[in-house]
Image (spheres, helix red, strand yellow):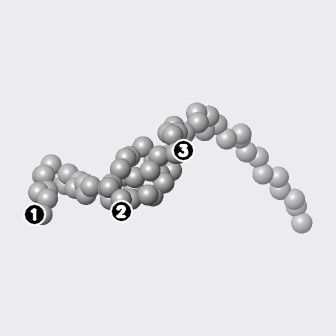
Amino acid sequence: MQETALKGRKFTGSTRAPKTYSTSRSCSHKGCDTRLSQYNKREFCYSHAPTKYPRLRGRIVKAEA
């Protein structure tokens, strides 16, 4: 049986560190004490984040009242 060796190249991905924010931030919603991740750039936690509607094929989807 013949042994085969695998050859490869060194991974040359991005070496830039991810952007970080303050580690002591909490959700801006009144009464919410959820601590936000240092990698989360938003001011609200997932539960209190405002709803965003994507644009679909050039049409603007109106928010439900």
Asked which quadrant contains residue 30, the reply is: bottom left
In the rendered structure, find residue 23 and report the number of the disc placed on it: 3
Residue type, numbered disc 1: Ala
| Nearer-the-camera pick, 55 or 30 | 30
What residue is drawn where x is 15% and y is 49%? 58
The Cα atoms of the two marked residues, 1 and 2, are separated by 19 Å
The Cα atoms of the two marked residues, 1 and 3, are separated by 36 Å
What is the count of numbered marks? 3
Sooner in the amino-acid sequence: mark 2 or mark 3 = 3
x and y, in percent, of residue 12 in the image: 64, 37
Residue pushed farthest bottom? 1
Horizontal side of 1 relative to 55 (left or right) equals: right
Residue for badge 1: 65
Residue for badge 2: 47
Residue type, numbered disc 3: Thr
Residue 64 vertical placement versus 36 (above, below): below
Horizontal side of 49 relative to 33 (left or right) equals: left
The Cα atoms of the two marked residues, 2 and 3, are separated by 19 Å
| Nearer-the-camera pick, 31 or 11 | 31
What residue is drawn where x is 58% and y is 33%? 16
Mark whose residue sits in front, 1 or 3: 3
Horizontal side of 39 relative to 53 (left or right) equals: right
Q: Could you tell me which secondary element the residue under label 2 belongs to?
A: loop
Marks 1 and 3 in Cβ contact (< 8 Å): no
Sooner in the amino-acid sequence: mark 1 or mark 3 = 3
x and y, in percent, of residue 63 in the image: 14, 59
For mark 1, does the 10 Å Cα neighbourhood hold few (<14), some (14 to 19), or many (20 or more) residues?
few
Residue type, numbered disc 2: Ser
What residue is drawn where x is 20% and y is 51%? 55
x and y, in percent, of residue 35 in the image: 48, 54
Q: Could you tell me which secondary element the residue under label 1 belongs to?
A: loop
